[in-house]
Image (spheres, coloured by chain):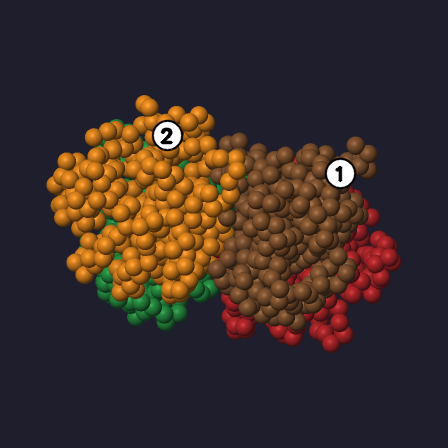
Chain colours: A brown, B orange, C green, D red
């Protein structure tokens, strides 16, 4: 078990190459937002764009399109009924997020199945929220990409791992992550990242000011942007994404009783700049 | 009769426990917003989220969904025609607000009746605006939860209490509050909070810069968030909510001829932080 | 002819009475915004709310409702097809604005006719944009309220007064204003306010940074709020509204090549506060 | 070949004449924004308005109207199905932009053909994004106005010029621009502007923080506003527009890891003011 520090940000957030274009920094697709939980996918999209993903397409219920563009014209959008277009977008993406505000209706399950059937081994998949719940259930033994990241809170981790909340110690959770073979971002007041090899990285950060709806969607958006953008070492990228999220929250919480997810998103570009790595310091520290 | 001071904020706004999640800080449901008055429920929702409610669901006319999410993706939303879903949301809520922009149409009355039939004794109910007018009328002798808070302005208080505006002295109003058995936030240029025991707490704050449409909706949102979040002493929570609202307005009015409700909402997290109680000071003052 | 100075702001912007409520500061109704020019009524509404109108209802094409509430939940809104409701709103208003983005379609003319038939002598009417053009045409010899304010730019003033742009000197325009019997805010690079008595007040302010679409709609919104709020001396209120608008624009133009109408609206509350009159200085200067 | 410097801003951004109105600074029409790429036209419109175009009308899919007005009430909007109205708007415009989020569907092609048939020699045309791709294809040998500006990225320039990306040296590209007879803004990490005479102006600016979706749409909006507003020397106007865009991006990138297109738009008015030319310095340098 390792406790993360600011070093993880400096390791991951490399100086961008001068000769680059938007494709260089990754294409992402974000699937979620049913009529009730549309705000979740809007928050994930904002975090993804502000965290530097080159191109972001949101695949969501038609109802969420206007609010998305009113807030974030930088994102592209397609109706989640349009499966032909959705398949094209997903296939050309580097990282795909599913789950933020997806719900657990038949429609949600249909979309999840569609996605898992569309993805190939080149993709990085991020599974959040209700998509974790859906994947934890028996009727869905469809294989998922090798490079999959789950971001469960405690109850979702119980569903996915079978470990009851009171049993979710680091050792048992690490063993389960190894069995699942994925990166697990286990969110709690001290979020821990488990690797497919069974290693654990603990965040020393986190504040109860973050305990408000949408906080996890913002994290999922950052994770997706980092996965698409900093592909070399996916575990480190995910650790850095989680660290960044809580780091900004703690800074904001110094002067705020409650920190809103969208306030975190707005601070991402400046905070990333502060930790940008100028020299190629290859993890020797 | 007691005149409130900043002490009420320090008593109520406790330091959040480190081990907590969004459920810890309360689930709220906000019902209102007809096609004409949709802005009212948007303002209440913003205030509720910014005042720290863990989870906020808005139950409103479909027309208000897109503007809500364009402004506040942190809130969830359902159509107020979807009674099955509305019932589930209400049942799982800690505090429920009804009235902001609800209107007085048959639809409004239907929703109020539905709500009162759905609530149980565990719920805290906040009744604002036209919902007060509807409840003041004879055809609705349906019982309401023990822990109900009414937030009438002078004319609504006349309808609810039977006291004409010129008769609304502290003594008579306190006696009426005792008869009704609820907490009354009687809004005027010097807002007074009456308890079910007939006590009165007077706000020493308030500025005519607050006299603009939507100000009451913002107050109702803060009251709901505080009721859901600081449940131990409901009277104190309501007093603190009202104090906070006017305190921010007075600060903003130092440099503004008119203060907008949404400007107050934006200042809530910082202002709550300034008055956060670090030690467990239990009301000994 | 008199050149206006900052004194006009101090004369008009009185300290608000402590015992007041939103009704004290006027009810306004704003009619405009066809499918193409919807932004115009949104800008007028924002200016009206920020300039201190107690209650603001926008009567506009249904298409503009969601954008209005996404920007300005403080305003109420009704569909301009709903004539019964529109009539009620207009009747209970203190000041009514028509014209911002109204268009010159048959629908526009229908709304103008409806309004003129609904208004009574107690109302203050503000006529802007295409409503001026419509009223200038022969088929509309319907009488309008004694207290009417027209806010034409040069071409609209030509249509209304019959004076060609090159003939629009102060003397001739003043004589036309006297004949029409209304207050005329004649917008140009040096805006002039003409009174029904034929007096002229010239703005010494104005910057080409203001020459962008929507600037007049913002002025119309301020005029309406001032008319509803500061009723005692309507000529002075209109002069103050026009002065405030250009004063803010000039301040912003010190650091901006172009000043946007919405940027002006946002600065209204602070600027009004700076010129608020504390003593009752009754126009002795 | 010439490397541009800040001088280009001072040459182009002249002090506005005191006697002017919104027509003085140009009428623009922006065509684009299909259901998927609606954000692109919203970003172009914001940049166009903030860069000082006197009047801006957006011709776009109906779905984009509400988000446009929620963000930018200063723009007017019409449905891109309404060809009669679109023709009127285009005819009365000084500069027309097509392509941002236009797509490559039959609908997109129909709009492009319509536009090219509607334009006359008095118009300045800006062709961006998928409109370049469509114009590069054989089925469209329709002539375009003499004063046309193309803003291709490397792949679009390949399609338009026939030069493969690796062949796109300055000399060959300049020769192609001469053949096409238009101004080419060839976007890459070092954007170059080619003139119809085959001259080349290289931007010494640009940062990888700009490599995010929507950046080109913002540039296209600025180019259109400058073309409509500073007509005297179109090549210089386009150079200044491109310089301004990258200049703001570089400034923002000093403290941001990624710079969003909408953040650039917001900084335009202040940055233009900083470089405003007070004396008539006629290009003597």
Q: Quadrant of residue D116?
A: bottom right
Residue A22 locus on image (x, y percent):
72, 53
Residue B30 locus on image (x, y percent):
38, 53
Q: Which dot, 1 or 2, sits closer to the camera?
A: 2
Q: Quadrant of residue B48?
A: top left
**Residue ID for mark 1:** A11
Residue B92 locus on image (x, y percent):
41, 53
For image coordinates 38% across by 64% down, the residue present is: B83
For image coordinates 75% across by 57% down, the residue present is: A146
Q: Label 2 is found on which chain of the structure? A: B
**Residue ID for mark 2:** B11
Residue A198 locus on image (x, y percent):
73, 46
Provide the secondary structure element on which disc 1 rests.
Answer: helix
User: Residues under labels 1 and 2: Cα distance?
Assistant: 44 Å
Bin the neighbour count of mark 1 within 10 Å (Cα to Cα): few under 14, some 14-19, many 20 and up: many
Note whether residue D35 is visible: no
Note whether residue A147 is visible: yes
Q: Label 1 is found on which chain of the structure? A: A
Q: Quadrant of the C terminus of chain B?
A: top left
Provide the secondary structure element on which disc 2 rests.
Answer: helix
Q: Quadrant of the N terminus of chain B?
A: top left
For image coordinates 34% across by 68% down, the residue present is: C81
Q: List the single residue furthest toward the bottom.
A: D139
Is residue A240 placed above or below C32 in the rendered structure? Answer: above
């Amino acid at each position: 078990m390792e406790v993360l520090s600011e070093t993880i940000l400096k390791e991951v957030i490399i100086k961008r190459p001068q000769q680059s274009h938007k494709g260089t920094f990754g294409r992402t697709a974000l699937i979620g937002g049913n009529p009730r939980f549309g705000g979740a996918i809007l928050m994930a999209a904002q975090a993804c764009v502000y965290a530097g993903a080159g191109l972001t397409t949101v695949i969501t219920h038609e109802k969420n399109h206007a609010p998305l563009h009113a807030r974030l014209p930088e994102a592209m959008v397609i109706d989640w009924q349009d499966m032909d277009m959705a398949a094209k977008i997903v296939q050309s993406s580097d990282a795909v997020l599913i789950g933020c505000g997806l719900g657990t209706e038949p429609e949600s399950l249909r979309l999840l199945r569609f996605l898992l059937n569309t993805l190939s081994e080149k993709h990085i998949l991020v599974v959040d929220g209700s998509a974790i719940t859906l994947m934890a259930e028996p009727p869905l033994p469809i294989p998922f990409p090798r490079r999959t990241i789950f971001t469960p809170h405690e109850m979702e981790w119980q569903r996915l791992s079978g470990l009851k909340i009171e049993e979710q110690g680091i050792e048992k959770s690490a063993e389960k992550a190894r069995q699942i073979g994925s990166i697990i971002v286990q969110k709690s007041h001290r979020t821990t990242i488990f690797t497919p090899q069974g290693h654990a990285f603990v965040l020393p950060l986190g504040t109860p000011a973050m305990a408000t709806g949408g906080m996890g969607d913002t994290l999922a958006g950052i994770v997706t942007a980092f996965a698409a953008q900093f592909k070399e070492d996916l575990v480190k990228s995910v650790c850095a994404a989680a660290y960044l999220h809580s780091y900004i929250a703690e800074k904001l919480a110094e002067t705020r009783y409650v920190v809103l997810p969208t306030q975190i998103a707005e601070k991402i570009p400046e905070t990333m700049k502060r930790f940008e790595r100028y020299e190629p310091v290859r993890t020797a520290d």
